[in-house]
Image (tube, rainbow, N blue to C red):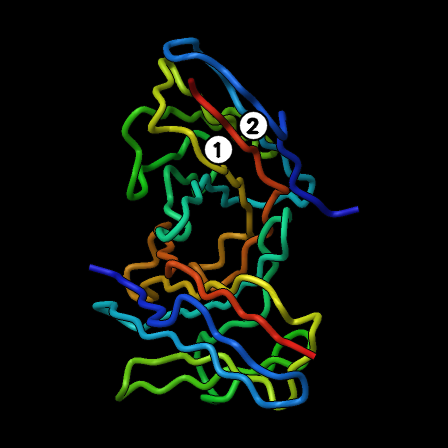
Amino acid sequence: AQSVAQPEDQVNVAEGNPLTVKCTYSVSGNPYLFWYVQYPNRGLQFLLKYITGDNLVKGSYGFEAEFNKSQTSFHLKKPSALVSDSALYFCAVRDGVNQGGKLIFGQGTELSVKP
Amino acid sequence: EAQVTQNPRYLITVTGKKLTVTCSQNMNHEYMSWYRQDPGLGLRQIYYSMNVEVTDKGDVPEGYKVSRKEKRNFPLILESPSPNQTSLYFCASSFNLGGRDEQYFGPGTRLTVT
């Protein structure tokens, strides 16, 4: 069965410092991995995805994520956090082999960036 | 403008009164899906549709129905709403490229069932 875990409910970072939001996954086949961001009172917005190829994926707003197959992780990173990055972040996984329609989301991580 | 629209955005109703939340996309996407968002539980998939007349259950389908008669529309139906269906609901769509494509989300519908 597919599953996603975001072990931290909240991450606090000072502006200008690097940030990491953690995600681990479990799928039976090859994973398709996604990060989405939700700003207050808004729908989710796509940030980046890993399908195949280079393990380091770059996305919107300066975010990047590294796919680590041995650790089954897909952590979201940014070298220098901005106050405007404060939002709720979701990791999601789909089983690429089965290619079904199911998409599993993690429970979300609240990122707070303080000036 | 490419978008996913949902209506209504806010709804307060009573137990047992049938309701429909509409979802429409203008991007010619094959794939559409409904999610509910609850604190501490993230987003959970209710139903999804790979194309017209093709729908399947997600993780939490109980108490919900969907239909996909046209490509652009994917309504969510609650035949007899109950208080445990109070939640924030999102519709999403994408191209169906073997699951590789990212989804576009609607603005959400906040439903309260009393």
Kind of residue at disc 1: Val
Classify the position of the C terminus of chain B by image quarter: top left
Q: Nearer the viewer, residue A82 or A75?
A: A82
Q: Residue furthest top?
A: B17
Residue type indicated by callout 2: Glu
Q: Say what secondary structure mark 2 lies in.
A: loop
Name the mark on residue B52: 1
Q: Position of residue B104 (x, y in %)?
A: 60, 51
Whether residue A51 sits left or right of residue B25 in the image: it is left
Please give the residue where the numbered disc 2 appears in the rendered image. B70
Label 2 Cα crowd, 10 Å radius (few <14 / some 14-19 / many 20+): few
Q: Which mark, residue A88?
A: none
Contact, CB < 8 Å: mark 1 with mark 2?
yes
Of residues A20 and A100, the one nearer the viewer is A20
Judged left or right of residue B93, residue B4 is right
Does residue A105 sit above or below B80 in this rendering? Answer: below
Q: Secondary structure at mark 1?
A: loop
Q: Residue at x 53, y 40 (%)?
A: B91
